[in-house]
Image (spheres, coloured by chain):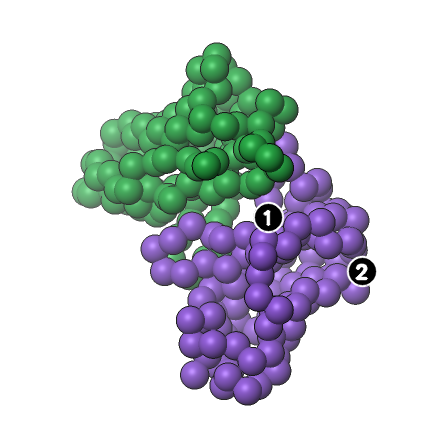
Chain colours: A green, B purple
Amino acid sequence: LAKTTQPISMDSYEGQEVNITCSHNNIATNDYITWYQQFPSQGPRFIIQGYKTKVTNEVASLFIPADRKSSTLSLPRVSLSDTAVYYCLVGVKDSNYQLIWGAGTKLIIKP
Amino acid sequence: DTEVTQTPKHLVMGMTNKKSLKCEQHMGHRAMYWYKQKAKKPPELMFVYSYEKLSINESVPSRFSPECPNSSLLNLHLHALQPEDSALYLCASSPGQRTTYEQYFGPGTRLTVT
């Protein structure tokens, strides 16, 4: 059964680095790993996307090992406004192609 | 313009009503999606349109009927819904259908079925 797995929740403090890992054993060969952020009563918002190794943009980094069966979203120096739910999204290939969302990680940042 | 708009923002409907949700994007994207999201759950894919043709239907009950009149518009027609269909309905678009492409989401329609 194609699925992804993320921690249900995490706590951290302002100014710290936060790492959230998603496992995705059946990721499709040619597909990317994408991470989204969602605030209450809003649609998800794109954070970062990668295929392999490391990708960095102005808000986050994404680390992907060579086997691509997991990925780690890294948020540097978090602030209170980073309190949100974070989802990984991958394409997986079993008998057919599916877009699979992780269950989401509720990140709470404390002052 | 990187915005996906959805109307209405909120909708309350009875189980015998017929209503429609609307979604619009002007980014030239060729894939459009309907998702259903319950509280504290990830978005649940319902339908995908690719180049204005229905490419994915995730075994959604027929009381939900999607329509893609043109490349910028996506509708979801609702009829004879059940209270358990109450949820946030999200529309998204992307340049293509696979995860290679970033999805842009609208703010959602909060649907309550009474």
In the image: residue B51, left or right of residue A95: right
Residue sitting nearer the eye, A89 or B59: B59
In the figure, B59 relative to B13: above or below?
A: above
Q: Secondary structure at mark 1?
A: strand
Residue B104 numbered tag: 1
- The residue to which callout 2 is attached is B70
Q: Residue at (35%, 29%) from the top-left corner? A: A21
Residue B64: x and y, percent? Answer: 60, 69
Whole-angstrom CA distance, mark 1 to mark 2, is 18 Å
Task: Please tell me whether mark 1 or mark 2 is closer to you in this view.
Answer: 2
- Residue at (48% x, 20% y) in the render: A68
User: Depth check: A12 or B47 in front?
Assistant: B47
Task: Indicate the amino acid at tag 1.
Answer: Tyr
Q: Residue at x 20, y 43 (%)?
A: A110
- For the C terminus of chain B, the quadrant is bottom left
Regarding residue B41, the answer to whether it shows in the image is: yes
Residue B105 image offset from top left, x and y in percent: 56, 52
Q: Quadrant of residue B5?
A: bottom right
Q: The residue marked by circle 2 belongs to what chain?
A: B
Say which label, 1 or 2, has the lower sequence index: 2
Query: Which one is nearer the viewer's eye here, A106 or A13?
Result: A106
- Crowding at label 2, few (<14), some or many (≥20) Cα neighbours within 10 Å? few
Q: Position of residue B37 (x, y in %)?
A: 45, 58
Residue at 25 percent of width and 29 percent of height: A16
Q: Is residue B45 above or below residue B99?
A: below
Q: Is B75 left or right of A53, judged from the image as shown?
A: right
Closer-to-camera residue (B105/A17): B105
In the rendered image, residue A85, in percent from the top left (x then y), is placed at 36, 46
